[in-house]
Image (cartoon, helix red, strand yellow):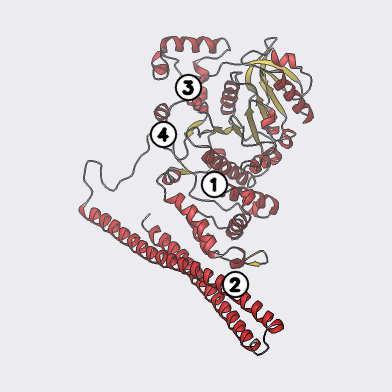
Amino acid sequence: MSALYLGKTNDGRRLELDPRTLTTHAAIIGMTGSGKTGLAIALLEEAALSGVSAIAIDPKGDLANLLLTFPNLSQSEFAPWSDDPARTAAEWRAGLKSWDLDENNIKALKQSANFRLYTPAASHGEPINALGSFAAPPPALLEDSDLLNALAASTVANLLGLVNIAAQTAGKETALLTAIIDDAWAKGESLDLETIILRVVKPPFDKIGVFALESFFPQAKRFDLAAKFNALIASSAFSSWLKGEPLSIDRIFGGAKPTIAVFSIAHLGDKERMFFVTLLLNAVVAWMRSQEGSPRLRGLIYMDEIFGYFPPSANPPSKTPMMLLLKQARAFGLGAVLSTQNPVDLDYKGLSNIGAWFIGRLQTAQDRERVLAGLVGAGGFSGATSEQIAALEKRRFILKTDRLESFETRWTMSYLKGPLTRDQIRLLTPKQETVSAAPPSRPAPKTELVRDAGAEKKKAAIEAGYEREKRRLLEKRSRLLIKLDKEKSDTKRSAIGAIVTIGSSLLGAFFGSRRSAPNKIASAVKSVASAQKERGDEARVNGEIAEIDRLLSELEARKISDLAAFS
């Protein structure tokens, strides 16, 4: 495995990093414009040339530049990507030459690895099926209860985040989903979201801890939770999460030829980004624990702009698998490289697991002092001053491993276009082949059209039948709620009447005519009996409402099951 050529030191020596250094993980820190992305792309290029696969998580859209490699450095190759392709081609040729690189190096890079650009929940890049399965961990991981619990907790927090429920405040929801996942994984059973929804309504167990399921989390409340997830999968946007090849870490890290897999998530919202990053990191941890140990670097996980995913105080779903990687991945030959504008974006416990630090320019004195204080406290950095960091120019970094080096990053073989638009990403994505029963020029057989139309008609009829029954139950529930309000009012009135009558009877017995006392006491007893009857009626109506809630839950579960045959 060859050394990673990242640049040249101040005295003109080539800076070549031993790949094994990255098994102790690395951090790239510098202000916007300091050259962090260029350094990361150079590092990933060198990984590919050394036969090392990598997963690159790209929240900004810059890392797609890894696919902009032009082996002839010609004007025509740059034309779709530059307003002045002749000037850009000449600039790139000269830039590479100044770093002892040329067209042959670019050709070697393109041949060294498969470069893939995935866009979860979107089709402008290669789609990836991220929600098809919450796969059961490998048998080796099932024996590690602590790790298994950590992955289950992260998965549950991730799921609840999809429906805007904070796991920290959702005790019952967290316990239920954790029990469902634990039950399935213990049996070696993988889950998909539809199965999870059905099991929320009707779990395969009747206890959570020592409490009976219905006492701990009644069915009506479980139905409310299931309905939130059902609304998610019923949305038109959900289907895009299921398109493309299944997410497979083994395909990336275990192939015969290295793969550089860029997961571009710039098009996703914050909630969806967190969901996908957590899902991906959990999958990496599960794959890692199924492998044998390795002293060599066998794979990299690079995260561009880590802010929000591994904070020092908050506990987002992504934090647990990230911490597991930093603590355990070294033994399996995996290295994590995290990029950020400031080390305060990183959890302080994680800092102690990082062995290589790339420090670029930081603008303010306060930022520089915080960097130095944070890194010295983590045992990872010493020997540089705030003034040295302030004096760094663009593309210049201080590297701290077992020694201190100041260097300038080399020219990248990939053209640094910057963030790509959706249309530009489409130009880099191979067209997806579609499989059809008949050639495109020939219309589908009439029998197929009739079968499709019949299936759609049957599906529509089933949906309409369920909706009619649902409306009937909801109307009955509304009538019962009105009746319940009346019963509560009657109960309150009867209770007040009973209290008044009893008080009056007691006062009459002591201060009034003794002859009328028996009649007043009898009246009081009658009032109490009436109040008790009203309370009984109220309880009966509550029971009827609970029964309707149960029927609604069963109805929704049957509907999901019946319609699944048409998906």
How far from the left and from the top, in percent, is residue 411?
56, 16
Task: Please say whether residue 457 is visible from this viewpoint.
Answer: yes
Residue picked out by circle 2: 496
Q: Amino acid at mark 4?
A: His
Q: Mark 1 or mark 4, which has the lower sequence index?
A: 4
Q: Amino acid at mark 2?
A: Ile
- SS type, badge 3: loop
Q: Amino acid at mark 1?
A: Asn
- SS type, badge 4: loop
Dividing the picture into quadrants, the one containing residue 98 is top right
What residue do we see at 74% from left, 37% from top?
Answer: 349
In the visual, does 374 lie left or right of 81? right
How far from the left and from the top, in percent, is residue 164?
54, 46
Q: Nearer the viewer, mark 2 or mark 3?
A: 2
Task: Please say whether residue 206 is visible from this viewpoint.
Answer: no
Residue picked out by circle 1: 164
Residue picked out by circle 4: 124
Q: Mark 2 or mark 3, which has the lower sequence index?
A: 3
Residue picked out by circle 3: 69
